[in-house]
Image (tube, rainbow, N blue to C red):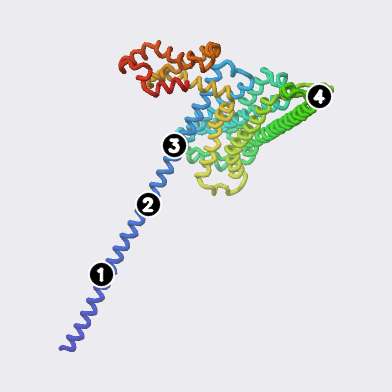
Amino acid sequence: MSAVTSANGTTVISATLTSAAITTTAVSVAIGGDEVSLADDLIRGLAEDAWLLGYLIKCAAMCFIVVAALFGNLLVMVSVMRHRKLRVITNYFVVSLALADMLVAIFAMCFNASFEVTGRWLFGRFMCDVWNSMDVYFSTVSILHLCCISVDRYYAIVQPLDYPLIMTKARTVVMLASVWVSPVMISFAPIFAGWYTTDDHLEYWAQHPDACTFVVNKKYAVVSSSVSFWVPGVIMLFTYYRIYQEADRQERMLYRSKVAAALLNKHLQINGISALGALSTSDAVKDVDVETDPDSGAFRPTASSNKMKRERKAARTLGIIMSAFLACWLPFFIWYMMSSLLEGAYWMPRWITVLVFWVGYFNSALNPLIYAYFNREFRVAFQKTLQSCWPRSPPWCPPCLRGRRRYDHSRNDTATPTAAFGGPHNAYNHSNVSEVHYMNNPANIALLQNNGGGGLGGVGGSCRTEQNVL
């Protein structure tokens, strides 16, 4: 009995231990499963947060590019309309370029942004063709404008004497008309006729009428990219290279003239001519540089020192222009050719496609800055246009700053009498004139009375500082 009991007890104990081990293992597995589930939830939450952050950054970047393109190009057009000094032949191209870039923002960027934000096409098959056509059309028009501006600058800098004869108003109109008409041949006509795509893509569209994809065949890819980018890009590279060569040649010519003037000055001093006369002669040589005409042998004046500085600045600006153009559009057209000509090239991630599209669009926002803001006359026109959009005396503006323009005007008007009275050492100087105008302002008199009648000192140091600064 005991043996049996012992045997049974052993068996029972063994079974009990086995059951306990199984229970412990099950609990461990359950706990481990919870840990794996928590880790998966954490990773999933981080992935969702990262996706949301990227989505918000993408939306913000798209909105910024659209608003910058609209506002900047509209500012260019309004500034030229408001300021007669800017209405020259060269700026015809700039204004037309601004219009093209603004239309890119309206008809190309906005539709693309809606597709990227929602993840699907919302406007039907017909509007898909319209959007693709306008995207190709206005982007090509913008690039062709850059090409026309490079040709205009080429004749203005490399052939300045022939420029008025070559770039006439009639020829400018013909160039602009060609720029706006020729892109129709690679946009609306082939897209609505169905020549641009493949048979497989047409079958896919027949089965998915709500989709909007732009798949092109090899012939269309070569022709459209050549007209839109490669040919204009080669022309721009050639013209800007020749402009840079001309600017460098004129700079070297200016250096030689300065060396010749210095040698002449030294020679005159050695021969006993007074220093004053030598300086006058040297200044005359510097101001009136001459070179020999290779055709006639006669002397003709060259560009002055100030003009040389402008040419060097123009050369640097052209470097910025070409860098921005290539940085914005070259990645897109490389992707465009690879995805169209190479078999199986659609392995590229979706974000690369979105990036190259919007980097190209960004060029429409950069053009107003590059082609207009680097021009001093445009900068002044921009400032005046923006100032006209704001009230002269905002409610939050302190009284001592509301009369700033009046103080500026008073100081300009009294500059000559002050100099006649002995300049800044005379008691009747600019600061006193500004204080007189300040006291003649009824609003300022009331302010002084409220402050206890302490004169100009009662207004506070800020107003006195403003008078001295102005």
**2 or 4: tag closer to the N-terminus:** 2
Q: Is residue 219 left or right of residue 267?
A: left
Q: List x then y, in percent, for residue 103.
A: 53, 27
**1 or 3: tag closer to the N-terminus:** 1
- Whether pointer 1 and pointer 2 mark residues with C-beta atoms closer than 8 Å, the reply is no
**1 or 2: tag closer to the N-terminus:** 1
Q: Residue at x 60, y 32 (%)?
A: 190
Q: Which residue is mark 2?
A: 44
Return the residue nearer the eye: 174 or 182.
Answer: 174
In terms of secondary structure, where does tag 3 sit?
Answer: helix
- Per the rendering, the mark at residue 23 is 1
- Per the rendering, the mark at residue 60 is 3
Q: List x then y, in percent, for residue 6.
A: 19, 86
Pair 1/2: label in front: 2
Q: List x then y, in percent, for residue 263.
A: 77, 30
Q: Is residue 97 left or right of residue 257?
A: left
Return the residue nearer the eye: 324 or 214.
Answer: 324
Residue 189 appears in the picture as rendered = no
Pair 2/3: label in front: 3
Dot 4 surroundings within 10 Å: few (below 14), some, or many (20 or more)?
few
Measured in 3D between alpha carbons, the distance from the residue under mark 2 to the one under mark 4, in whole angstroms, is: 77 Å
In terms of secondary structure, where does tag 1 sit?
Answer: helix
At label 3, which amino acid type do we have?
Ala
Q: Is residue 306 left or right of residue 32?
A: right
Q: Residue at x 71, y 33 (%)?
A: 248
Measured in 3D between alpha carbons, the distance from the residue under mark 1 to the one under mark 3, in whole angstroms, is: 55 Å
In terms of secondary structure, where does tag 2 sit?
Answer: helix
At label 2, which amino acid type do we have?
Arg
Q: Quadrant of residue 392?
A: top left
At label 1, which amino acid type do we have?
Thr
